[in-house]
Image (cartoon, helix red, strand yellow):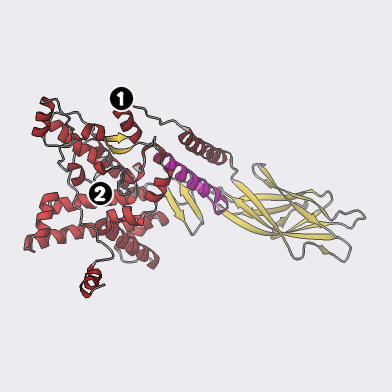
């Protein structure tokens, strides 16, 4: 290699930086859908912590609250305890299956309409256009010199971005504490350090990701495009350039002359509007692309051009490559929304959702769990009796104090002693559990001396609400020599 060639090789960058994207404002069906969903999702996120829900005395009245102090998750009338972590597992399964189903039906439609990165980036785009103008104006200003007007616009834009980002971080911490109380503490500069730290973290991430990184999050950072590409199939609807209609591309005048002469002329006039409005800078006419988030804004832009030149709309549409090939072959279009994978995803969603609803509707407001001592499993007392020790948790999910009676159903003849229980005249073991609390008890089951005590036999405890008579049982093992 010569010295000149070596010098040229060193000048070649290893990484080509992405060009700045200036999405153009567009109006249409899919833009309206995105705007509606933006207001709905942001409205829920920002204001839901202030919705109240009366749960009675001794309980928080915030409708949605993750209460670390009480170790509970409140969602309107639903209360999830730490012992019910399987509901969180169910929610994760439902979320995954819903995402898979959306992908099987319409590709990355989640990314285009509901992904937080898309929603907040869209909001930041609106702010940018409000202060700096639309695509061409922003490009002209960025290419020109710095002026007082430009500095003023940049300052106002970034100030509003920071306010939105701060509000985003502040709204998040409101889900972990009583919202009005925490807002008051923030205004009085009395908020706890943990809240301030998380507000700062989420303010920074929102400002950077939505204001600067934008499409790079979708293209480089997010793993879902790669997963989605592996899960999709030829029947999934995707934003598609219908090249059977669009090619060959030419200007309006040339297309008119070609059609008049009986030649081939596509509807695409190569105006580039589909690229100008794309938030990730994708040219959908080049085929499926990892950067396409299926937002449909290119459809709105193309439809507007088609209406101006008096050509049919939906040159770009939610379609499949299979249908493009079928139209080229003179065959009718075929949409297969109901197919094995969509039925499977829907069935899993229905099954898991049904199980969760059933368990929520049938679960008891009392619960008992037991853990047998492991070392030793049993103790032989001086009089020959066999004693087993257990740790028992009694759960009271009501907002009032309750009294529970604990008894042994099996083995027959066993005696029960509960540390901390009140022993009434009948020898019953009564324990009190406060409202919305879990009480940990120490329990001893003693079986008198006998000639035929098996080494293992069922140990069944019965817990009864003294006031209502509601009963639950729990089984363990009674160990002996």
Comes first in the chain, label 2 or label 1: 2
Identity of the residue drawn at 79% across and 55% down: 478
Label 1 Cα crowd, 10 Å radius (few <14 / some 14-19 / many 20+): few
| Residue assigned mark 1 | 330
Q: Quadrant of the N terminus?
A: bottom left
Identity of the residue drawn at 55% across and 39% down: 355
Residue 252, percent across and down?
10, 34
Residue 401 disc label: none
| Residue assigned mark 2 | 122
Identity of the residue drawn at 28% across and 65% down: 14
Q: Is 317 left, or right, of 66 in this rendering?
A: left
Label 2 Cα crowd, 10 Å radius (few <14 / some 14-19 / many 20+): many
Q: Which residues are magenta?
A: 77-102
Indicate whether 290 appears above or below 380.
above
Question: Front-most of 479 and 286?
Answer: 286
Q: Is 465 left, or right, of 258 in this rendering?
A: right
Identity of the residue drawn at 89% across and 64% down: 383
Residue 285, percent across and down?
24, 41
Task: Label the magenta part by its dominant secondary structure.
Answer: helix
Task: Tell whether label 1 touches label 2 (CB within 8 Å).
Answer: no
Q: Is residue 401 visible?
A: yes
Q: Which of label 2 and label 1 is nearer to you? A: 1
Q: Quadrant of residue 180?
A: bottom left
Give the secondary structure at mark 1.
loop
Indicate whether 339 appears above or below 176.
above
Q: Is 434 left, or right, of 386 in this rendering?
A: left
Question: Front-most of 232 and 73?
Answer: 232
> Was residue 115 drawn as part of the magenta stretch in this picture?
no
> Was residue 93 drawn as part of the magenta stretch in this picture?
yes
């Amino acid at each position: 290699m010569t010295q000149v060639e070596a010098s040229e090789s060193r000048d070649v960058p290893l990484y080509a930086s992405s060009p700045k994207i200036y999405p153009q404002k567009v109006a249409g069906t899919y833009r309206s859908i995105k705007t509606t969903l933006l207001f709905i999702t942001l409205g829920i996120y920002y204001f839901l912590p202030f919705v109240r829900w009366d749960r009675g005395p001794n309980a928080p009245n915030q409708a949605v609250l993750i209460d670390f102090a009480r170790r509970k998750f409140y969602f309107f009338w639903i209360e999830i305890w730490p012992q019910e972590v399987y509901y969180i597992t169910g929610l994760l399964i439902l979320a995954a299956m819903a995402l898979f189903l959306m992908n099987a039906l319409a590709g990355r439609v989640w990314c285009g309409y509901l992904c937080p990165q898309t929603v907040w980036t869209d909001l930041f785009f609106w702010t940018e256009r409000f202060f700096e103008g639309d695509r061409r104006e922003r490009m002209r200003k960025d290419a020109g010199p710095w002026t007082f007007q430009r500095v003023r616009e940049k300052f106002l834009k970034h100030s509003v971005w920071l306010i939105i980002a701060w509000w985003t971080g502040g709204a998040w911490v409101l889900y972990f504490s009583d919202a009005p109380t925490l807002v008051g503490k923030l205004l009085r500069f009395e908020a706890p350090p943990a809240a301030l730290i998380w507000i700062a973290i989420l303010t920074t991430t929102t400002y950077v990701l939505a204001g600067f990184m934008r499409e790079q999050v979708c293209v480089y950072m997010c793993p879902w495009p790669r997963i989605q590409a592996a899960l999709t199939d030829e029947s999934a609807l995707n934003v598609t350039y219908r090249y059977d209609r669009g090619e060959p591309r030419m200007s309006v005048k040339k297309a008119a002359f070609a059609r008049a002469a009986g030649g081939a002329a596509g509807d695409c006039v190569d105006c580039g509007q589909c690229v100008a409005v794309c938030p990730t800078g994708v040219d959908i006419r080049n085929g499926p692309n990892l950067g396409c988030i299926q937002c449909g804004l290119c459809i709105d832009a193309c439809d507007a051009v088609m209406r101006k030149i008096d050509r049919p709309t939906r040159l770009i549409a939610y379609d499949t490559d299979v249908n493009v090939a079928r139209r080229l072959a003179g065959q009718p279009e075929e949409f297969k929304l109901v197919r094995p994978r969509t039925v499977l995803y829907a069935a899993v969603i229905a099954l898991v959702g049904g199980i969760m609803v059933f368990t929520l509707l049938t679960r008891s407001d009392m619960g008992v769990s037991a853990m047998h001592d492991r070392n030793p499993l049993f103790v032989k007392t001086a009089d020959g009796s066999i004693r087993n020790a257990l740790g028992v948790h009694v759960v009271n999910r009501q907002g009032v104090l309750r009294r529970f009676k604990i008894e042994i159903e099996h083995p027959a003849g066993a005696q029960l002693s509960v540390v901390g229980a009140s022993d009434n005249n009948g020898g019953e073991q009564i324990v009190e559990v406060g409202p919305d609390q879990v009480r940990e008890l120490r329990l001893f089951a003693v079986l008198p001396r006998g000639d035929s005590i098996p080494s293992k036999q069922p140990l069944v405890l019965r817990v009864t609400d003294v006031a209502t008579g509601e009963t639950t049982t729990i089984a363990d093992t009674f160990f002996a020599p």
